[in-house]
Image: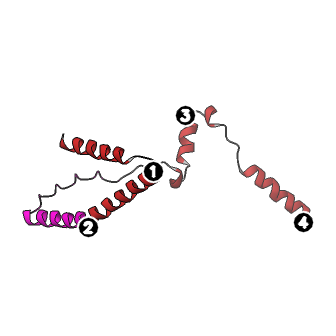
Amino acid sequence: MALKKKSARQSSKRTSTPKRAPASKRTSTAKRTAASKRTPSSRKVTSTRKTQKPLRVRPSRAPHVTVKTLDALNERLDMILPEVMVRIAAIEHLLVKNQLCMYDELINARQFIQEQERS
């Protein structure tokens, strides 16, 4: 008797899910009914967000703020520039010491850069 109940359960499970035709062979009504059976999570979600408002144009800065910003920038450059110059001098020294370049070539390169800055 237990075997009969078990086989009856298995056969009911097999027949409970009907086989569907592939999507390419379905008719338009079959496609509509299949689409209506979908769960909300399987649907394509379109954005319902409103379009963004254009960004507000910032008013021009007050003159005293611009002056403070320029002063702060000048202070930073005054601290950084000497360090950068020292590093460049150290690299030039190593180039000449290891005979990777001649001192005259360094002088010519500096002159070339000065000419480029002028024009």
Q: Nearer the viewer, mark 3 or mark 4?
A: 3
Residue 69 colored in magenta in the image: yes
Q: Are marks 2 and 1 in contact (CB under 8 Å)?
A: no
* The magenta segment: 49-78
Q: Nearer the viewer, mark 1 or mark 4?
A: 1
- Residue at image x 89%, y 60%? 4
Graded by Cα atoms within 10 Å as few (under 14), some (14 to 19) or many (20 or more), the crowding at tag 1 reads few
- Residue at image x 8%, y 66%? 64
Q: Is residue 46 left or right of residue 113?
A: right
Q: Amino acid at mark 4?
A: Ala
Q: Is residue 57 left or right of residue 9?
A: left
Q: Is residue 81 left or right of residue 17?
A: left
Distance CA(mark 2)–CA(mark 1) = 55 Å
Q: Are marks 1 and 4 in contact (CB under 8 Å)?
A: no
Residue 31 lies, in percent from the top left, at 56, 38
Say whether disc 1 or disc 4 marks the residue closer to the N-terminus: 4
Q: Nearer the viewer, mark 4 or mark 2?
A: 2
Residue 28 is labelled as: 3
The colouring scheme, among rainbow, by chain, secondary structure or one colour, is secondary structure
